[in-house]
Image (cartoon, rainbow, N blue to C red):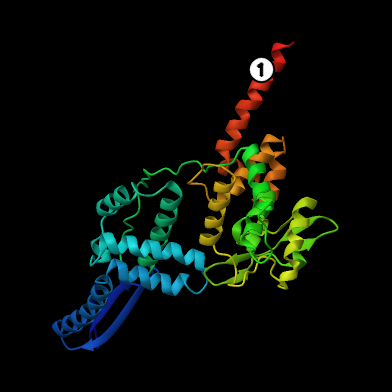
Amino acid sequence: MASYRKLKSGWKVTISQRDENGKLRQTSKQGFATKLEARRYAATIEQDIDGVKKAKQDVLFLDYYDQWVDTYKRPKAQASTMRKYYAVHNLIKDNFDGVKIQDVTRTSYQRFLNAIGQRYAKGSMLLFTSAIKECMRSAIADDIIAKDFTQQTEMVYGYQRRSVEYLTIAEIKKLARTIEQNLTPRHPIPYVIYTAIYTGMRLGEITALEWSDIDFDKRTISINKTWSSVTRKAKSPKTESSNRVIVVNRRLLDVLLQLKDNGHDMIFKTLHGMPVSRSVNASLRSFLKKAGIDKPSYHFHGLRHSHVAYLLSKGVDLYAISKRLGHKDMTITAKTYAYLIDEYKEKQDRQIVKAIDEI
């Protein structure tokens, strides 16, 4: 916006504009012989300003998102986190390909949420929408858009994951005995499965173990890193609570000692490198079949759930289980394993009723 003023030296024009932080900036020039000359000058300046704004606003939604990820996220994000941003890239490409960011409306964004929400669970939708919301705040700061189209929209999630399968106590014992009867040190993957049965550790935590992490005298395992299948390197756990020391039994330690002769610092290193999820799950399905356990959809992470189920059945305190799993607090444990806890609550309720009936 321009304002004009007649001075003794001629006409003065002042052009006012707000910068990307919302602060008012002014540009002035004086000495024009006529007001018309001052107007022409102001029009030239304002045209340049409007041209810059228009060029910025003409950017595509997908292009701005990719630029934002490359600038603000990629330099510090872990490989696992980057997969989330890649997933959002694909969703934007599939639904807003060729669409300018200024042309995305609250209505079109809500329709987008309605559509993809039918395919994803709540956790995934939270990841997707949080990334887009943060990106839009950046777009406003960059003066790309004036309003955040994600505001007052509602996340939709129609797909619900099934509860993870877990093994009964009899099945856990049967699987463990079957593995023990088929152990060969030159094939470490069955030892990975065996370790998960007795510890409830995550696959990355198990495969990252070195001999120095085991205290055979105190019968403990120190969990202080995790193996990344993406970078093929050990890295620090994502949260501080994942760093922990857990107690184990002598039976597990005696079995693990069989791998000592392989001559590797990494306990479970194979001739082809570190075990990967695909190979571990294939081996697990093979052992389930040998043990006569019919659970075709059961996978490695289910061993962690089975470990929790077993400890709950033995009356182990939830706080102790939470610490063993590496959770920040019991709330996470209770939320993750709610279906197990509810099952054992029903069992305890029956015992309570039986007990008070005897009063």
Q: Amino acid at mark 1?
A: Val
**Image vertical order of residue 291 relative to residue 351, above or below:** below
Name which residue lies at 65% across and 37% down. 170
Name which residue lies at 27% across and 78% down. 14
Where in the figure is residue 29, as x and y percent of width and height? 27, 85
Front in this rendered view, residue 172 or 122: 172
**Image vertical order of residue 45 relative to residue 305, above or below:** below
Residue extending furthest toward the left: 36
Other-residue count near label 1 (Cα within 10 Å), few / some / many at <14 / 14–19 / ≥20: few
Q: Is residue 170 left or right of residue 253?
A: left
Q: In which quadrant will I find the N terminus?
A: bottom left
Where in the figure is residue 292, as x and y percent of width and height? 56, 42
| Residue 220: quadrant of the picture | bottom right
Q: Is residue 296 left or right of residue 317?
A: left
Callout 1: SS: helix
Name which residue lies at 62% across and 61% down. 189
Where in the figure is residue 347, as x and y percent of width and height? 63, 26
Question: Is residue 216 visible in this depiction of the protein?
Answer: yes
Question: Is residue 300 visible in this depiction of the protein?
Answer: no
Front in this rendered view, residue 47 or 230: 230
**Image vertical order of residue 65 relative to residue 36, above or below:** above
Where in the figure is residue 356, as x and y percent of width and height? 71, 14
Front in this rendered view, residue 87 or 184: 184
Give the number of marks: 1
| Residue 144: quadrant of the picture | bottom left
Q: State the residue position of label 1.
A: 353
